[in-house]
Image (cartoon, rainbow, N blue to C red):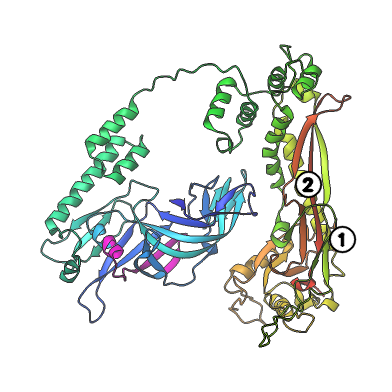
């Protein structure tokens, strides 16, 4: 299995905000069979080809644009209808047919349908398949949510358990299915095997996979042949069989010559139709030992090389994407065994004029490394910038290691300073008025109800002290920023949930957004009651607000029930007073967000029974988070420690603020009497 990126990327806050991931997946079936079978509808003499394909097997896939393997959760894949278009190469101008059945079976995505289009692309699929071409399948799907599973953690997807690090595409929407000529596994192939020489429409596609299925393809009819006036003459059956056999032999020879050691040459040879002689020549050239390159020794050392050496020593996963090949090569050759903290500071000190040869005078090394008491006149390497750049790479790992449910239920505001900002209520007297014959528009008003919010600064100072320097512990510059990043993540959670849970004057009966009583327990009846209360919300004129609820926010104790209400088609109750089965009217309606902060006794207003039904934060937000200059992640800075402290100091800070906003954007259910 493999996935190819075919659309622009979008940022997913649910995993790693510094990574961009595609918002479209093309899931390519690489090793499962695609079969075509001819059938004749009642009253028709011509046979219509029918296909069956295993489009996705539920396994992880390595793809371009994603840092780690990707697993698509088939339970979260939305199939708008059973009759989806089938195309050639994802082109809307190259139709092939349509599906009649799409289903998830045994953790795999199965599709069946017919070649119902009368197009050149449809004829190409049928004719090439008859000649032995190994067609594969590609499914176009839009991604609406992807989760990141960290190293050391695991996730159960498609009835299988996978260890991190990997991404799980939790929610996708199936678009279309295409026939494609190349998937991830080049070892699959197809050929035509004649059943009876004198019987029409009895040629069979046979794949070399264990799950291959025999299928039949129709011959081209005289009517189709007559219509191809601009194409080359149609070959005889014997010619087509000879071509298929020759192509099959060529593919086998190419794979034998490359022997799995030269995949790029093998792929190019198959795609471009190389002869076996040309393939052997290219493999021979690639096999020749390469003479070592003659390079002059560069005694100068740039800050980017030192930075790359630190990242290589710390084994950062994205080092090849962060630095060019020349920089990485210079860092690897200069520091073959990895760079230590003392060596890093000495290199910076020497570049800035330090004439000592060791780290014994550590204070002088630090002062020169940070650009103080220069003997060369000016600083050529900014060690503070190097340490800050390296530290920022590890800062986000700590920041994203804590719960981030807050980001999924809040709207985000970009502020340029620390002043209180005001915005007007989103609902009210904002309907359009009928325009008079003269064309004059009436003036509207923003209303008198407003929101307010402001950003504050939160930060922490940590040090790499003398012991780390003496121990030559480079790990200190990765451990400290991770702690600072984690501290920022914990702080934003603390501020956010303190604000959110202090809502007794926000969610109340007077605002028509608070429900209590035994019938508000989370379940079908409780959720129905909350949905009705939300939909009955009105604006200042007494008219419906026109906003739909989308999120069910629950504490950990209600996680299982929330997931059941979202995913289960029916919920059965075996008590004598309840009939079953009971259809679940809320299946797939509201996505579930679970936060451990909702029931934590350290926060005023916490409860393990209360839950919330909320609108989308970009539509009608209950709470808003403001970030200074739109910076959603913390910042780290590095400097030499004060005179009375021997070491290096790192400070992390984050500018943000949280405030409750629109009461009509949610319903709180007490969940008990």
Quadrant containing the C terminus is: bottom right
- Give 25 or 437, whichever is nearer the viewer: 437
Q: Position of residue 252 (x, y in %)?
A: 25, 42
User: Outermost residue toward the right?
Assistant: 644
> Which residues are the magenta region?
102-125
Residue with the most extreme left position: 198
Quarter where residue 55 is shown? bottom left
Check disc 1 and report the residue beneath it. Answer: 604
Query: Magenta span has 265?
Result: no
Task: Name the spot of residue 650 as percent of width and height, x first.
Answer: 78, 34
- Say left or right for 448 vs 66: right
Q: Position of residue 77 (x, y in %)?
A: 52, 63
The residue nearer to you, when weighing 502 against 423, is: 423
Image quadrant in which you'd find residue 277: top left
Residue at the spot 24% in from the left edge and 64% down from the top edge: 216
Q: Residue at x 16, y 55 (%)?
A: 240
Q: Which residue is mark 2?
A: 654
Query: Horizontal placement of 149 versus 58: left or right?
Result: right
Relative to 186, 502 lies left or right: right
User: Which quadrant of the structure image shows residue 169?
Assistant: bottom right
Q: The residue tagged with tag 2: helix, strand or loop?
A: strand
Numbered badge on residue 116: none
Q: Is residue 115 magenta?
A: yes
Q: Residue at x 37, y 52 (%)?
A: 31
Name the secondary structure under disc 1.
Answer: loop
86 to the left or right of 132: right
């Amino acid at each position: 299995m493999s996935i190819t990126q075919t659309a622009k990327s979008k940022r997913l806050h649910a995993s790693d905000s510094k990574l961009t991931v595609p918002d479209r997946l093309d899931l390519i079936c690489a090793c499962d069979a695609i079969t075509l079978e001819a059938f004749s509808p009642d009253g028709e003499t011509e046979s219509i080809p029918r296909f069956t394909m295993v489009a996705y097997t539920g396994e992880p896939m390595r793809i371009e644009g994603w840092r780690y393997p990707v697993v698509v959760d088939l339970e979260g894949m939305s199939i708008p209808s059973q009759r989806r278009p089938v195309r050639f190469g994802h082109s809307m101008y190259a139709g092939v047919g349509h599906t009649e059945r799409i289903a998830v079976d045994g953790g795999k995505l199965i599709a069946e349908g017919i070649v119902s289009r009368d197009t050149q692309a449809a004829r190409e699929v049928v004719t090439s398949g008859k000649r032995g071409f190994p067609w594969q399948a590609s499914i176009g799907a839009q991604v609406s949510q992807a989760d990141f599973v960290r190293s050391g953690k695991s996730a159960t997807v498609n009835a299988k358990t996978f260890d991190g690090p990997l991404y799980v595409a939790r929610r996708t929407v199936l678009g279309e299915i295409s026939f494609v000529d190349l998937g991830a596994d080049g070892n699959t192939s197809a050929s035509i095997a004649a059943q009876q020489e004198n019987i029409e429409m009895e040629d069979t596609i046979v794949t070399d996979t264990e799950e291959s299925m025999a299928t039949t393809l129709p011959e081209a009819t005289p009517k189709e042949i007559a219509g191809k006036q601009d194409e080359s003459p149609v070959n005889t059956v014997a010619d087509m069989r000879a071509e298929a056999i020759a192509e099959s032999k060529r593919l086998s020879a190419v794979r034998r010559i490359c022997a799995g050691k030269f995949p790029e040459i093998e792929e190019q040879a198959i795609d471009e139709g190389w002869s076996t002689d040309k393939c052997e020549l290219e493999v021979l050239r690639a096999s020749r030992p390469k003479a070592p390159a003659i390079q002059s020794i560069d005694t100068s050392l740039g800050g980017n090389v030192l930075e790359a050496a630190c990242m290589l020593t710390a084994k950062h996963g994205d080092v090849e994407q962060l630095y060019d090949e020349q920089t990485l090569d210079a860092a690897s050759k200069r520091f073959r065994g990895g760079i230590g903290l003392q060596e890093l500071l000495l290199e910076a000190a020497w570049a800035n004029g330090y004439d000592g040869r060791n780290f014994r005078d550590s204070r002088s090394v630090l002062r020169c490394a940070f650009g103080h008491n220069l003997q060369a006149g000016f600083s050529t390497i900014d060690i503070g910038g190097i340490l800050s750049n390296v530290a920022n790479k590890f800062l986000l790992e700590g920041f994203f290691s804590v719960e981030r449910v807050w980001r999924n239920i809040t709207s985000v505001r970009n502020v340029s300073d620390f002043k209180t900002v005001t915005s007007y209520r989103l609902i009210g007297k904002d309907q359009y008025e009928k325009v008079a014959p003269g064309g004059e528009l009436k003036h509207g008003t923003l209303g008198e109800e407003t929101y307010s919010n402001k950003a504050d600064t939160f930060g922490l100072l940590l040090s790499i002290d003398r012991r780390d320097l003496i121990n030559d512990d480079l790990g200190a510059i990765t451990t400290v920023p991770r702690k600072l990043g984690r501290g920022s993540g914990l702080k934003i959670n603390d501020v956010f949930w303190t604000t959110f849970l202090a809502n007794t004057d926000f969610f109340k009966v007077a605002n028509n957004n608070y429900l209590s009583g035994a019938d508000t327990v989370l379940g079908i009846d409780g959720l129905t009651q909350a949905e009705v209360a939300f939909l009955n919300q009105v604006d200042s004129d007494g008219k419906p607000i026109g906003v739909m609820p989308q999120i069910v926010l629950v504490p950990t104790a209600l996680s299982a029930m929330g997931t059941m209400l979202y995913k289960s088609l029916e919920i059965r109750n075996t008590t004598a007073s309840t009939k079953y089965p009971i259809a679940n009217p809320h299946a797939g309606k509201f996505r579930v967000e679970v936060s451990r902060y909702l029931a934590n006794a350290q926060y005023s207003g916490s409860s393990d029974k209360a839950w919330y039904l909320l609108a989308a934060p970009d539509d009608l937000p209950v709470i808003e988070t403001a970030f200074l200059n739109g910076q959603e992640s913390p910042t780290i800075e590095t400097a030499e420690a004060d005179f009375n402290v021997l070491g290096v100091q790192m400070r992390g800070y984050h500018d943000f603020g949280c405030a409750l906003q629109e009461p009509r954007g949610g319903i709180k259910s007490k969940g008990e009497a």
